[in-house]
Amino acid sequence: MKNADLALQNGSEALLADQGQMLTPRPSVNREKLEQHLREALRLLHVDLDDENLRDTPRRWSESLITMTSGYDFTDVKRLSTLFRKACSTADENCQNLVVIGGTYKTLCAHHILPFFGHFIVGYIPERTIIGASKIPRIVEVHMRRLQSQENLAHDVADMIERILEPRGLAVWMGGMHMCMVMRGVEQESSFMETNVLRGNFLSDERTRQEFMSIVNRRGQHGTVP
Ligand SMILES: [Zn+2]
């Protein structure tokens, strides 16, 4: 069994739990070597590692990177969707209402390994299957704990939800602040970016799309989510 599969098996209970982090022990990561390399990277930047404030930084940096990339322990899409299907139920035949779930995300950008973070809003119209509301943030979490772009993150989340629920329509909106644009490059203090992924009914039906976008406009921009 691959390490990632093992982590998925061990971490599966935590993944379906309503509270707590989806932390995995990450057995496949060589902690000692990672810490060594990060120590070396800091030395190359002329950071004084004898300073008592910095003495333990390579270990802390390494531990935080291990946590923030723990989504790589859950890359088996098939197993992951099977697991999340356990948290699903069958909707009423007449239930074709828009289901909306929102929350926050934080991740590291794939280009600079700097944080970007913000809000997401997921909307779907069930075909037969609905999922427990707390599982959508969990699906986001699995994918945000990797090196990401906002575009990829939104598509990864949409792909996974589509696979699990096969809904009539699906929309994933994300709006976030990107530290790689604030702290370097253009150094824009207000570098807010929006991503919108629309599928099925949300593409073909103007009213459905409008309904979703009005929720995004009410909630998404102001830091409060449904
Ligand atoms: Zn970046």
Image: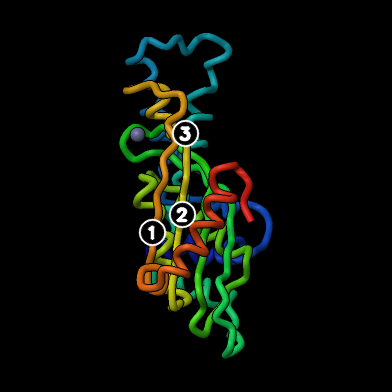
Whole-number angstrom distance, CA of label 1 to CA of label 3: 33 Å
Instruction: Pick the residue in front: 19 or 101.
Output: 101
Instruction: Pick the residue in front: 11 or 167.
Output: 167
- Numbered label attached to residue 134: none
Instruction: Pick the residue in front: 42 or 145.
Output: 145
Q: Quadrant of ligand 1?
A: top left
Q: Position of residue 26 (x, y in %)?
A: 48, 50
Mark 3 nearby-residue class (10 Å; few <14, some 14–19, many ≥20): many
Name above or below for residue 27 compared with residue 157.
Answer: above
Residue drawn at x 55%, y 48% is 220
> Residue 112, located in which quarter of the rendered image?
top left
Of the residues shown, which amino acid type is indicated by label 3? Ser
Q: Position of residue 110 (x, y in %)?
A: 34, 40
Residue drawn at x 42%, y 66% is 160
Earlier-in-chain disc, 2 versus 1: 2
- Which element type, helix, strand or loop, lies under badge 1? strand
Q: On the image, numbered disc 1 is attached to which residue?
A: 197
Q: Residue furthest bottom?
A: 93
Q: On the image, numbered disc 2 is attached to which residue?
A: 173
Left or right of residue 17: residue 39: left
Whole-number angstrom distance, CA of label 3 to CA of label 2: 31 Å
